[in-house]
Image (spheres, grey):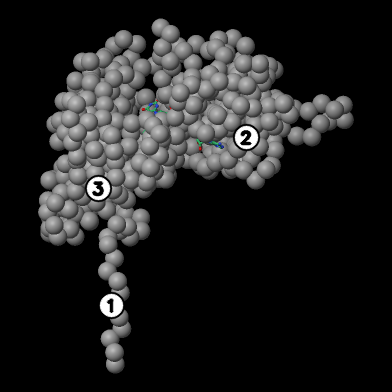
Amino acid sequence: MPPDADGNRRRRVVIVGGGFGGLAAAHKLRHADVDVTLVDRTNHHLFQPLLYQLAAGGISTTECAEPIRFALRKSRHTKVVMAEVTDVDAERRQVVLDRGERLDYDSLIVACGAQTSYFGHDEWRDVSYGLKTLAEAEALRSRIYAAFEEAERAKDPAAREEWLTLVVVGGGATGVEVSGVLGIIAAHRDKRTFSGIDPRNTRVILLDAGDRVVPAFSEKLSGKVAKYLGELGVSVREGARATDIDEHGVTVEIDGKTERIPCRTVIWAAGVRAAGLTERLAKAAGANTDRAGRLEVNPDLTLPGHPEISAIGDATSLKGPGDRPLPGLATVAIQQAHHVTKAIRAGQPGATTPFKYFDKGALAVVGRGKAVCEIRGRELSGRIAFFTYLGVHLYYLGGGLGRRLELLTDWVTARIGHLENQVIEGELETVERVPEAAEPAR
Ligand SMILES: Cc1cc2nc3c(=O)[nH]c(=O)nc-3n(C[C@H](O)[C@H](O)[C@H](O)COP(=O)(O)OP(=O)(O)OC[C@H]3O[C@@H](n4cnc5c(N)ncnc54)[C@H](O)[C@@H]3O)c2cc1C
Protein backbone atom coordinates (compact mmCIF):
# COMPACT_ATOMS: atom_id res chain seq x y z
CA MET A 1 0.00 0.00 0.00
CA PRO A 2 1.43 3.48 -0.89
CA PRO A 3 2.15 5.93 1.98
CA ASP A 4 -0.68 8.29 3.01
CA ALA A 5 -0.46 12.12 2.93
CA ASP A 6 1.59 12.10 6.16
CA GLY A 7 4.03 9.59 4.71
CA ASN A 8 2.67 6.78 6.89
CA ARG A 9 2.43 3.39 5.34
CA ARG A 10 1.52 -0.06 6.54
CA ARG A 11 4.40 -2.31 7.48
CA ARG A 12 5.38 -4.83 4.81
CA VAL A 13 5.84 -8.47 5.73
CA VAL A 14 7.35 -10.87 3.22
CA ILE A 15 6.91 -14.59 3.84
CA VAL A 16 9.07 -17.04 1.88
CA GLY A 17 7.32 -20.40 1.55
CA GLY A 18 3.69 -21.44 1.52
CA GLY A 19 4.21 -24.71 3.40
CA PHE A 20 3.03 -25.41 6.92
CA GLY A 21 5.00 -22.57 8.53
CA GLY A 22 4.52 -19.92 5.85
CA LEU A 23 0.80 -20.52 5.38
CA ALA A 24 0.16 -20.50 9.13
CA ALA A 25 2.03 -17.18 9.35
CA ALA A 26 -0.06 -15.67 6.53
CA HIS A 27 -3.29 -16.85 8.17
CA LYS A 28 -2.29 -15.34 11.50
CA LEU A 29 -1.50 -11.98 9.87
CA ARG A 30 -4.83 -11.86 8.06
CA HIS A 31 -6.35 -9.21 10.31
CA ALA A 32 -3.09 -7.49 11.26
CA ASP A 33 -2.27 -3.93 10.28
CA VAL A 34 0.34 -5.06 7.75
CA ASP A 35 0.64 -5.81 4.03
CA VAL A 36 1.74 -9.38 3.47
CA THR A 37 3.42 -10.86 0.40
CA LEU A 38 3.82 -14.63 0.37
CA VAL A 39 6.28 -15.99 -2.20
CA ASP A 40 6.47 -19.67 -3.11
CA ARG A 41 8.08 -21.31 -6.11
CA THR A 42 5.07 -23.62 -6.40
CA ASN A 43 1.45 -22.51 -6.56
CA HIS A 44 0.32 -24.97 -3.89
CA HIS A 45 0.45 -25.71 -0.22
CA LEU A 46 1.47 -29.33 0.06
CA PHE A 47 0.14 -31.60 2.77
CA GLN A 48 3.31 -33.69 2.98
CA PRO A 49 1.99 -36.27 5.49
CA LEU A 50 -0.31 -37.58 2.73
CA LEU A 51 2.37 -37.77 0.01
CA TYR A 52 2.80 -41.49 0.47
CA GLN A 53 -0.94 -41.96 -0.17
CA LEU A 54 -0.65 -39.95 -3.37
CA ALA A 55 2.35 -42.02 -4.47
CA ALA A 56 0.34 -45.17 -3.83
CA GLY A 57 -2.62 -43.95 -5.86
CA GLY A 58 -4.85 -43.84 -2.78
CA ILE A 59 -5.74 -40.17 -3.16
CA SER A 60 -5.60 -37.60 -5.95
CA THR A 61 -3.30 -34.61 -6.38
CA THR A 62 -5.93 -32.09 -5.27
CA GLU A 63 -6.49 -34.05 -2.10
CA CYS A 64 -2.83 -33.63 -1.20
CA ALA A 65 -2.25 -30.05 -2.33
CA GLU A 66 -4.26 -26.84 -2.27
CA PRO A 67 -3.54 -23.69 -4.34
CA ILE A 68 -2.03 -21.07 -2.03
CA ARG A 69 -4.15 -18.36 -3.68
CA PHE A 70 -7.27 -20.33 -2.77
CA ALA A 71 -6.10 -20.92 0.80
CA LEU A 72 -5.53 -17.17 1.23
CA ARG A 73 -8.49 -15.91 -0.81
CA LYS A 74 -10.07 -14.27 2.23
CA SER A 75 -6.91 -12.43 3.26
CA ARG A 76 -7.47 -8.97 1.79
CA HIS A 77 -4.05 -7.56 2.55
CA THR A 78 -2.11 -10.58 1.32
CA LYS A 79 -0.51 -10.87 -2.09
CA VAL A 80 0.66 -14.23 -3.43
CA VAL A 81 3.61 -14.42 -5.82
CA MET A 82 4.65 -17.64 -7.52
CA ALA A 83 8.41 -17.23 -7.84
CA GLU A 84 11.64 -18.56 -6.46
CA VAL A 85 13.43 -16.37 -3.96
CA THR A 86 17.03 -16.51 -5.07
CA ASP A 87 18.65 -14.17 -2.58
CA VAL A 88 18.12 -11.71 0.26
CA ASP A 89 19.64 -8.25 0.42
CA ALA A 90 19.71 -7.93 4.20
CA GLU A 91 21.16 -4.40 4.11
CA ARG A 92 18.43 -2.96 1.88
CA ARG A 93 15.79 -5.22 3.40
CA GLN A 94 14.77 -6.75 0.09
CA VAL A 95 14.22 -10.28 -1.16
CA VAL A 96 15.39 -10.98 -4.69
CA LEU A 97 13.22 -13.08 -7.00
CA ASP A 98 14.25 -15.36 -9.87
CA ARG A 99 13.66 -12.67 -12.53
CA GLY A 100 15.59 -10.06 -10.60
CA GLU A 101 12.55 -8.32 -9.08
CA ARG A 102 13.01 -7.05 -5.53
CA LEU A 103 10.44 -6.96 -2.75
CA ASP A 104 10.90 -4.58 0.17
CA TYR A 105 10.19 -5.80 3.66
CA ASP A 106 10.04 -4.46 7.17
CA SER A 107 9.75 -8.01 8.51
CA LEU A 108 10.87 -11.14 6.72
CA ILE A 109 9.69 -14.64 7.66
CA VAL A 110 11.68 -17.41 6.01
CA ALA A 111 9.82 -20.73 5.94
CA CYS A 112 11.43 -22.39 2.93
CA GLY A 113 11.48 -25.91 4.39
CA ALA A 114 13.71 -28.80 3.35
CA GLN A 115 14.49 -30.87 0.28
CA THR A 116 15.61 -34.44 -0.39
CA SER A 117 19.30 -34.92 0.32
CA TYR A 118 21.52 -37.70 -0.99
CA PHE A 119 24.42 -37.12 1.41
CA GLY A 120 26.85 -36.07 -1.29
CA HIS A 121 25.67 -38.72 -3.79
CA ASP A 122 23.69 -36.43 -6.06
CA GLU A 123 23.99 -39.01 -8.85
CA TRP A 124 21.50 -41.17 -6.89
CA ARG A 125 18.82 -38.58 -7.59
CA ASP A 126 18.62 -39.82 -11.20
CA VAL A 127 18.23 -43.48 -10.25
CA SER A 128 15.91 -43.24 -7.26
CA TYR A 129 12.62 -41.61 -6.26
CA GLY A 130 12.33 -39.02 -3.49
CA LEU A 131 9.11 -38.26 -1.61
CA LYS A 132 9.18 -34.60 -0.66
CA THR A 133 7.35 -32.75 -3.43
CA LEU A 134 4.18 -33.22 -5.43
CA ALA A 135 6.22 -33.91 -8.58
CA GLU A 136 8.25 -36.58 -6.76
CA ALA A 137 5.13 -38.33 -5.45
CA GLU A 138 3.48 -38.30 -8.89
CA ALA A 139 6.65 -39.64 -10.53
CA LEU A 140 6.82 -42.40 -7.93
CA ARG A 141 3.20 -43.40 -8.51
CA SER A 142 3.85 -43.75 -12.23
CA ARG A 143 6.98 -45.77 -11.55
CA ILE A 144 5.32 -48.17 -9.10
CA TYR A 145 2.59 -49.07 -11.57
CA ALA A 146 4.95 -49.03 -14.55
CA ALA A 147 7.13 -51.58 -12.73
CA PHE A 148 4.27 -54.10 -12.86
CA GLU A 149 3.77 -53.43 -16.57
CA GLU A 150 7.49 -53.86 -17.22
CA ALA A 151 7.52 -57.10 -15.23
CA GLU A 152 4.57 -58.36 -17.28
CA ARG A 153 6.54 -57.72 -20.49
CA ALA A 154 9.89 -59.06 -19.25
CA LYS A 155 10.87 -62.33 -20.90
CA ASP A 156 13.76 -63.18 -18.63
CA PRO A 157 12.83 -64.31 -15.05
CA ALA A 158 15.77 -62.36 -13.56
CA ALA A 159 14.60 -59.14 -15.26
CA ARG A 160 11.05 -59.82 -14.08
CA GLU A 161 12.29 -60.21 -10.53
CA GLU A 162 14.24 -56.96 -10.77
CA TRP A 163 11.03 -55.16 -11.73
CA LEU A 164 9.09 -56.84 -8.94
CA THR A 165 11.59 -55.78 -6.29
CA LEU A 166 10.92 -52.40 -4.67
CA VAL A 167 13.57 -51.09 -2.30
CA VAL A 168 13.02 -48.29 0.20
CA VAL A 169 16.14 -46.69 1.68
CA GLY A 170 15.64 -45.08 5.10
CA GLY A 171 13.59 -46.37 8.01
CA GLY A 172 12.31 -43.07 9.42
CA ALA A 173 8.58 -42.28 9.42
CA THR A 174 8.51 -41.58 5.65
CA GLY A 175 10.31 -44.83 4.76
CA VAL A 176 8.07 -46.85 7.04
CA GLU A 177 4.86 -45.29 5.69
CA VAL A 178 5.80 -45.80 2.06
CA SER A 179 7.00 -49.38 2.67
CA GLY A 180 3.72 -50.22 4.37
CA VAL A 181 1.69 -48.92 1.46
CA LEU A 182 3.88 -50.79 -1.06
CA GLY A 183 3.24 -53.96 0.94
CA ILE A 184 -0.49 -53.35 0.55
CA ILE A 185 -0.19 -52.67 -3.19
CA ALA A 186 1.71 -55.93 -3.67
CA ALA A 187 -0.81 -57.94 -1.69
CA HIS A 188 -3.93 -56.43 -3.21
CA ARG A 189 -3.16 -56.06 -6.90
CA ASP A 190 -5.55 -58.14 -8.89
CA LYS A 191 -3.64 -61.18 -10.18
CA ARG A 192 -6.34 -61.88 -12.79
CA THR A 193 -5.55 -58.71 -14.71
CA PHE A 194 -2.01 -59.97 -15.48
CA SER A 195 -1.09 -63.01 -17.50
CA GLY A 196 2.69 -63.19 -17.05
CA ILE A 197 3.17 -62.29 -13.38
CA ASP A 198 1.63 -62.69 -9.99
CA PRO A 199 1.91 -59.27 -8.30
CA ARG A 200 1.91 -61.02 -4.95
CA ASN A 201 5.47 -62.12 -5.75
CA THR A 202 6.56 -58.49 -5.39
CA ARG A 203 9.32 -58.06 -2.81
CA VAL A 204 9.34 -54.87 -0.75
CA ILE A 205 12.61 -54.36 1.11
CA LEU A 206 13.18 -51.60 3.66
CA LEU A 207 16.83 -50.81 4.33
CA ASP A 208 17.85 -48.87 7.39
CA ALA A 209 21.43 -48.08 8.36
CA GLY A 210 20.61 -47.80 12.08
CA ASP A 211 19.89 -50.65 14.44
CA ARG A 212 16.13 -50.08 14.41
CA VAL A 213 13.48 -48.38 12.30
CA VAL A 214 11.77 -45.14 13.46
CA PRO A 215 14.49 -44.36 16.03
CA ALA A 216 12.58 -41.25 17.12
CA PHE A 217 10.22 -43.64 18.92
CA SER A 218 10.99 -45.97 21.84
CA GLU A 219 12.52 -49.40 21.21
CA LYS A 220 9.17 -50.98 22.00
CA LEU A 221 7.34 -48.95 19.34
CA SER A 222 10.15 -49.50 16.81
CA GLY A 223 9.69 -53.23 17.39
CA LYS A 224 5.95 -52.90 16.77
CA VAL A 225 6.53 -51.01 13.53
CA ALA A 226 8.93 -53.73 12.32
CA LYS A 227 6.32 -56.36 13.26
CA TYR A 228 3.47 -54.56 11.44
CA LEU A 229 5.67 -54.20 8.35
CA GLY A 230 6.52 -57.90 8.49
CA GLU A 231 2.79 -58.70 8.56
CA LEU A 232 2.42 -56.66 5.36
CA GLY A 233 5.14 -58.74 3.71
CA VAL A 234 7.83 -56.05 3.93
CA SER A 235 11.32 -57.37 4.56
CA VAL A 236 12.88 -55.01 7.13
CA ARG A 237 16.66 -55.02 7.10
CA GLU A 238 18.20 -53.05 9.94
CA GLY A 239 21.94 -52.19 10.05
CA ALA A 240 21.91 -52.16 6.23
CA ARG A 241 23.67 -49.16 4.68
CA ALA A 242 23.17 -48.41 0.99
CA THR A 243 26.62 -47.72 -0.48
CA ASP A 244 25.66 -47.49 -4.14
CA ILE A 245 22.52 -47.14 -6.23
CA ASP A 246 22.22 -47.52 -9.98
CA GLU A 247 19.52 -48.34 -12.51
CA HIS A 248 19.77 -52.06 -11.79
CA GLY A 249 20.01 -52.22 -8.05
CA VAL A 250 21.35 -51.23 -4.67
CA THR A 251 24.65 -52.23 -3.08
CA VAL A 252 24.33 -52.66 0.64
CA GLU A 253 26.82 -53.04 3.46
CA ILE A 254 25.45 -55.25 6.19
CA ASP A 255 27.43 -56.81 9.07
CA GLY A 256 30.69 -55.81 7.35
CA LYS A 257 29.70 -57.67 4.17
CA THR A 258 28.68 -56.22 0.83
CA GLU A 259 25.52 -57.42 -0.84
CA ARG A 260 23.82 -56.53 -4.11
CA ILE A 261 20.03 -56.29 -4.37
CA PRO A 262 18.97 -56.29 -8.04
CA CYS A 263 15.96 -54.02 -8.46
CA ARG A 264 14.65 -51.31 -10.77
CA THR A 265 12.78 -49.10 -8.30
CA VAL A 266 14.51 -47.48 -5.35
CA ILE A 267 12.71 -45.02 -3.09
CA TRP A 268 15.03 -42.67 -1.25
CA ALA A 269 13.66 -41.74 2.17
CA ALA A 270 16.98 -41.48 3.97
CA GLY A 271 17.55 -37.79 4.33
CA VAL A 272 16.64 -34.18 3.85
CA ARG A 273 18.55 -30.94 4.09
CA ALA A 274 17.33 -27.36 4.30
CA ALA A 275 16.22 -25.70 1.05
CA GLY A 276 19.09 -24.03 -0.83
CA LEU A 277 17.99 -20.49 0.05
CA THR A 278 19.22 -20.91 3.65
CA GLU A 279 22.88 -20.87 2.56
CA ARG A 280 22.41 -17.63 0.64
CA LEU A 281 20.45 -16.03 3.45
CA ALA A 282 23.11 -17.08 5.98
CA LYS A 283 25.74 -15.39 3.83
CA ALA A 284 23.65 -12.25 3.37
CA ALA A 285 22.77 -11.89 7.05
CA GLY A 286 26.00 -13.20 8.60
CA ALA A 287 24.24 -16.20 10.15
CA ASN A 288 25.41 -19.81 10.50
CA THR A 289 23.97 -23.04 9.14
CA ASP A 290 24.42 -26.55 10.54
CA ARG A 291 25.59 -29.64 8.63
CA ALA A 292 22.12 -30.08 7.13
CA GLY A 293 22.08 -26.48 5.88
CA ARG A 294 19.60 -25.36 8.55
CA LEU A 295 19.80 -21.78 9.79
CA GLU A 296 20.95 -21.44 13.38
CA VAL A 297 18.42 -19.04 14.83
CA ASN A 298 18.27 -17.18 18.15
CA PRO A 299 15.90 -18.68 20.76
CA ASP A 300 13.32 -16.06 19.64
CA LEU A 301 13.65 -17.36 16.01
CA THR A 302 15.35 -14.24 14.65
CA LEU A 303 18.72 -14.31 12.92
CA PRO A 304 21.62 -12.91 14.99
CA GLY A 305 21.84 -9.14 14.51
CA HIS A 306 18.61 -9.05 12.46
CA PRO A 307 15.51 -8.64 14.63
CA GLU A 308 13.52 -8.12 11.40
CA ILE A 309 14.43 -11.54 9.90
CA SER A 310 12.81 -14.62 11.42
CA ALA A 311 13.25 -18.17 10.21
CA ILE A 312 10.95 -21.05 11.09
CA GLY A 313 10.23 -24.73 10.43
CA ASP A 314 12.37 -27.31 8.65
CA ALA A 315 14.80 -24.63 7.41
CA THR A 316 16.01 -23.94 10.94
CA SER A 317 17.96 -25.54 13.71
CA LEU A 318 16.98 -24.83 17.31
CA LYS A 319 17.34 -26.78 20.51
CA GLY A 320 14.19 -27.67 22.42
CA PRO A 321 13.41 -29.44 25.71
CA GLY A 322 16.30 -31.53 27.05
CA ASP A 323 18.69 -29.62 24.76
CA ARG A 324 17.60 -31.86 21.88
CA PRO A 325 17.11 -30.33 18.41
CA LEU A 326 13.47 -29.69 17.58
CA PRO A 327 12.16 -32.30 15.13
CA GLY A 328 11.29 -31.51 11.50
CA LEU A 329 7.54 -31.60 12.05
CA ALA A 330 4.63 -29.55 10.78
CA THR A 331 3.58 -28.87 14.37
CA VAL A 332 6.94 -27.19 15.08
CA ALA A 333 6.68 -24.99 11.96
CA ILE A 334 3.10 -23.96 12.79
CA GLN A 335 3.82 -23.13 16.43
CA GLN A 336 6.87 -21.12 15.37
CA ALA A 337 4.74 -19.21 12.85
CA HIS A 338 2.33 -18.32 15.65
CA HIS A 339 5.20 -17.14 17.87
CA VAL A 340 6.66 -14.81 15.24
CA THR A 341 3.36 -13.41 13.99
CA LYS A 342 2.13 -12.67 17.52
CA ALA A 343 5.07 -10.27 17.86
CA ILE A 344 4.51 -8.75 14.39
CA ARG A 345 0.84 -8.19 15.19
CA ALA A 346 1.96 -6.38 18.33
CA GLY A 347 3.99 -3.96 16.16
CA GLN A 348 7.44 -5.52 16.55
CA PRO A 349 9.67 -6.56 13.60
CA GLY A 350 9.95 -10.09 15.01
CA ALA A 351 9.72 -11.97 18.30
CA THR A 352 11.90 -11.01 21.25
CA THR A 353 10.91 -13.78 23.66
CA PRO A 354 12.20 -17.37 23.41
CA PHE A 355 10.08 -19.83 21.44
CA LYS A 356 8.76 -22.69 23.57
CA TYR A 357 7.71 -25.85 21.75
CA PHE A 358 4.61 -27.60 23.03
CA ASP A 359 5.31 -31.22 22.15
CA LYS A 360 2.15 -32.71 20.68
CA GLY A 361 3.82 -36.06 20.07
CA ALA A 362 4.89 -38.01 17.03
CA LEU A 363 2.99 -40.45 14.85
CA ALA A 364 3.81 -42.97 12.13
CA VAL A 365 1.24 -44.98 10.23
CA VAL A 366 1.97 -48.48 8.98
CA GLY A 367 -0.30 -49.80 6.27
CA ARG A 368 -4.01 -49.70 6.90
CA GLY A 369 -5.44 -49.28 10.33
CA LYS A 370 -2.19 -49.50 12.26
CA ALA A 371 0.07 -46.81 13.62
CA VAL A 372 2.32 -45.96 16.53
CA CYS A 373 2.29 -42.73 18.44
CA GLU A 374 4.02 -41.18 21.38
CA ILE A 375 2.20 -38.30 23.04
CA ARG A 376 3.77 -36.65 26.07
CA GLY A 377 5.39 -39.86 27.28
CA ARG A 378 2.34 -42.03 26.53
CA GLU A 379 2.78 -44.69 23.92
CA LEU A 380 -0.03 -45.98 21.73
CA SER A 381 0.00 -48.54 18.97
CA GLY A 382 -2.37 -50.46 16.68
CA ARG A 383 -5.87 -49.21 15.89
CA ILE A 384 -6.14 -46.68 18.70
CA ALA A 385 -2.94 -45.01 17.44
CA PHE A 386 -4.35 -45.06 13.91
CA PHE A 387 -7.52 -43.26 14.98
CA THR A 388 -5.42 -40.73 16.90
CA TYR A 389 -3.46 -40.23 13.68
CA LEU A 390 -6.69 -39.62 11.76
CA GLY A 391 -7.87 -37.12 14.36
CA VAL A 392 -4.60 -35.17 14.22
CA HIS A 393 -4.74 -34.98 10.43
CA LEU A 394 -8.36 -33.94 10.48
CA TYR A 395 -7.29 -31.03 12.65
CA TYR A 396 -4.33 -29.96 10.53
CA LEU A 397 -5.74 -30.45 7.03
CA GLY A 398 -6.49 -27.21 5.24
CA GLY A 399 -9.96 -26.02 4.24
CA GLY A 400 -13.33 -26.09 5.91
CA LEU A 401 -14.61 -28.94 8.02
CA GLY A 402 -16.59 -30.33 5.06
CA ARG A 403 -13.49 -30.62 2.89
CA ARG A 404 -11.48 -32.16 5.70
CA LEU A 405 -14.11 -34.80 6.42
CA GLU A 406 -14.53 -35.58 2.72
CA LEU A 407 -10.79 -35.97 2.32
CA LEU A 408 -10.44 -38.20 5.35
CA THR A 409 -13.32 -40.37 4.19
CA ASP A 410 -11.65 -40.74 0.78
CA TRP A 411 -8.38 -41.50 2.45
CA VAL A 412 -9.74 -44.12 4.85
CA THR A 413 -11.76 -45.81 2.10
CA ALA A 414 -9.02 -45.47 -0.56
CA ARG A 415 -8.66 -48.70 -2.49
CA ILE A 416 -4.90 -48.72 -2.74
CA GLY A 417 -3.57 -51.06 -5.39
CA HIS A 418 -6.93 -51.32 -7.15
CA LEU A 419 -7.28 -50.76 -10.86
CA GLU A 420 -8.90 -47.34 -10.86
CA ASN A 421 -5.91 -45.81 -9.04
CA GLN A 422 -3.20 -47.20 -11.24
CA VAL A 423 -2.75 -44.30 -13.60
CA ILE A 424 0.68 -44.06 -15.20
CA GLU A 425 1.44 -40.62 -16.60
CA GLY A 426 2.87 -41.12 -20.06
CA GLU A 427 4.51 -44.13 -21.65
CA LEU A 428 6.92 -46.70 -20.27
CA GLU A 429 10.30 -45.00 -20.25
CA THR A 430 12.70 -47.80 -19.83
CA VAL A 431 11.66 -50.19 -22.58
CA GLU A 432 14.53 -50.68 -24.98
CA ARG A 433 13.19 -49.41 -28.24
CA VAL A 434 13.59 -51.55 -31.32
CA PRO A 435 14.68 -49.45 -34.33
CA GLU A 436 11.72 -48.85 -36.60
CA ALA A 437 11.59 -51.37 -39.44
CA ALA A 438 12.41 -49.91 -42.84
CA GLU A 439 9.42 -49.32 -45.09
CA PRO A 440 9.06 -52.46 -47.25
CA ALA A 441 9.97 -51.86 -50.92
CA ARG A 442 6.98 -51.75 -53.23
C1 LIG B 1 6.43 -37.79 3.44
C2 LIG B 1 6.38 -36.85 4.63
C3 LIG B 1 5.53 -37.13 5.69
C4 LIG B 1 5.46 -36.27 6.79
N1 LIG B 1 4.59 -36.57 7.82
C5 LIG B 1 4.48 -35.69 8.86
C6 LIG B 1 3.54 -35.94 9.90
O1 LIG B 1 2.82 -36.94 9.89
N2 LIG B 1 3.44 -35.02 10.90
C7 LIG B 1 4.22 -33.89 10.94
O2 LIG B 1 4.08 -33.07 11.86
N3 LIG B 1 5.12 -33.64 9.98
C8 LIG B 1 5.27 -34.51 8.95
N4 LIG B 1 6.20 -34.27 7.95
C9 LIG B 1 7.09 -33.10 8.09
C10 LIG B 1 6.39 -31.82 7.69
O3 LIG B 1 5.79 -31.95 6.42
C11 LIG B 1 7.41 -30.69 7.70
O4 LIG B 1 7.99 -30.61 8.98
C12 LIG B 1 6.74 -29.35 7.36
O5 LIG B 1 6.27 -29.37 6.03
C13 LIG B 1 7.71 -28.18 7.56
O6 LIG B 1 7.05 -26.99 7.24
P1 LIG B 1 7.86 -25.76 6.62
O7 LIG B 1 6.88 -24.65 6.50
O8 LIG B 1 9.11 -25.55 7.38
O9 LIG B 1 8.30 -26.26 5.19
P2 LIG B 1 7.42 -26.85 3.95
O10 LIG B 1 6.07 -27.26 4.41
O11 LIG B 1 8.30 -27.85 3.33
O12 LIG B 1 7.26 -25.57 3.01
C14 LIG B 1 8.34 -24.96 2.39
C15 LIG B 1 7.82 -24.16 1.20
O13 LIG B 1 8.84 -23.28 0.76
C16 LIG B 1 8.86 -23.25 -0.66
N5 LIG B 1 10.21 -22.82 -1.04
C17 LIG B 1 11.39 -23.42 -0.78
N6 LIG B 1 12.42 -22.71 -1.26
C18 LIG B 1 11.87 -21.61 -1.86
C19 LIG B 1 12.42 -20.50 -2.54
N7 LIG B 1 13.74 -20.33 -2.68
N8 LIG B 1 11.57 -19.59 -3.05
C20 LIG B 1 10.22 -19.72 -2.91
N9 LIG B 1 9.67 -20.76 -2.26
C21 LIG B 1 10.47 -21.69 -1.74
C22 LIG B 1 8.51 -24.67 -1.06
O14 LIG B 1 8.00 -24.71 -2.37
C23 LIG B 1 7.47 -25.03 0.01
O15 LIG B 1 6.17 -24.74 -0.43
C24 LIG B 1 6.29 -35.12 6.84
C25 LIG B 1 7.15 -34.85 5.78
C26 LIG B 1 7.20 -35.70 4.67
C27 LIG B 1 8.14 -35.40 3.55
Q: Where 65 falls versus 215 (above or below)?
A: below
Name the amino acid type tagged 3.
Answer: His
Please identify the quarter of the rendering in which residue 223 is found. top left
Beta carbon at label 1 within 8 Å of ligand 1: no
Q: Position of residue 54 (x, y in %)?
A: 34, 42
Beta carbon at label 3 within 8 Å of ligand 1: no
- The disc placed on residue 437 is 1
Name the amino acid type tagged 1.
Answer: Ala
Q: Where 92 falls versus 101 (above or below)?
A: above
Quadrant showing the C terminus: bottom left
Q: Which residue is mark 3?
A: 248
Q: Which residue is mark 2?
A: 87
Figure quarter occupied by ligand 1: top left
Which secondary structure lies at badge 3?
A: loop
Asked whether residue 386 is in view, the answer is no
Which secondary structure lies at badge 2?
A: strand
Residue furthest to the bottom: 442
Q: CA distance from mark 3 to mark 2?
A: 39 Å
Q: CA distance from mark 2 to mark 1?
A: 53 Å
Q: Position of residue 216 (x, y in %)?
A: 31, 19
If you read the primary sequence from the N terminus, does the residue marked by circle 1 or circle 3 appear first?
Answer: 3
The residue lying at 17 percent from left, 53 percent from top is 159
Q: Position of residue 222 (x, y in %)?
A: 23, 20
Q: Depth check: 112 or 358 in front?
A: 112
If you read the primary sequence from the N terminus, does the residue marked by circle 3 or circle 2 appear first?
Answer: 2
Name the amino acid type tagged 2.
Answer: Asp
The residue lying at 70 percent from left, 38 percent from top is 102
Which secondary structure lies at badge 1?
A: loop
Asked whether residue 173 is in view, the answer is yes
Image check: 73 left or right of 219? right
If you read the primary sequence from the N terminus, does the residue marked by circle 2 or circle 1 appear first?
Answer: 2
